[in-house]
Image (cartoon, rainbow, N blue to C red):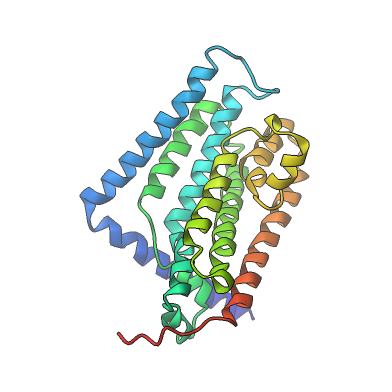
Amino acid sequence: MQNTIKGSFLFFAKLVSLNIQAPMALRTSFLMQVIFMLLNNLVYFTVWWIFFTRFKEINGWGLAEIEAMYALTAASFGTALVFGAGARQIALKIVHGELDTYLVQPKNPLLHQVGSLSQPSGWGDMITATVLLYMSGYGTLVNIPMLLLFVFCGASFFLATAIIANSLAFWLGHVDQLARQILEFVITFSVYPQNIFPAGFKVILFTILPAGFISYLPIEILKSKNYLWIFGLVAACAFYLALAQFIFYRGLRRYESGNKIG
């Protein structure tokens, strides 16, 4: 069992390493994607800076908390793009019968698909996160271990959401647009403080759409220093990853080969 887990980890690490190096070979294209994503994020965040020139806080959250919230979301999503952008293509691979390549190999097909693509724009997200965390004051040396854990969990939530949404293609067919919209919903609600939403909607943000776990709960942990909540965050992260794996392999039983040659 340990050898299997270790082998899967080493395989995924090597696969991701190769896929990260591939876009870097086209340096101009790589740098342009990184820079444009960085600028896009900073332009979007300008709205919050303008807002806080007139208002001091939103239900106890000031500019520092909003900066940290946006930073965690950007870092989590950027990490998911760099290390697992293939998760967003699962639906297309299912519909076109292109999972055959992974199924005939002695490697975990889900890991293989998730790690089959790396998007350079994710680096722009991570640079944005570094800048905003520094500006927020939450990016201290003491907080770095927790922040890294929060980013890992946030990226896992994004990947789990992408896998679950795209795996619906096993039952519903062409759902790639729907899957993209679901992921965008999670991103959108991750960059707004959840304390502005009614209680009923908060339930959705901690269940169907795990946006609350990506940024809101981590910031509350940093603010309140209630570190026991970390166990709840990690447990939720493990649950969503397990659920994503279960749904993918459950749907895989319905998969029909594309019988493609080449």
Relative to 257, is 137 above or below? above
Residue 189 in the image: x percent, y percent? 59, 40
Query: Which of these two is toward me, 56 or 106?
Result: 56
- Which x, y percent locates residue 132? 48, 31
| Number of marks present in the image shown | 0
Q: Position of residue 89 (x, y in %)?
A: 44, 64
Above or below — where is 197 with respect to 227?
above
Pick out the residue farthest to the top.
Answer: 54
Quadrant in the picture for residue 239: bottom right
Q: Is residue 22 left or right of residue 138?
A: left
The residue drawn where x is 55% and y is 17% is: 52
Residue 246 image point, x, y percent: 65, 72
Q: What residue is rendered at 44% in x and 43% in y?
A: 126
Q: Is residue 140 visible?
A: no
Q: Quadrant of the C terminus?
A: bottom left
Left or right: 9 as drawn, with respect to 218: left
Please determine whether, in this image, residue 45 is positioned above or below residue 212: above
The quadrant the N terminus occupies is: bottom right
Picture layout, residue 222 above or below residue 161 = above
Q: Residue at x 59, y 72 (%)?
A: 171
Name the foreground residue: 119 vs 11. Answer: 119
Q: Is residue 5 left or right of residue 36?
A: right
Q: Is residue 82 visible?
A: yes
- Name the residue: 66% across, 40% down: 218
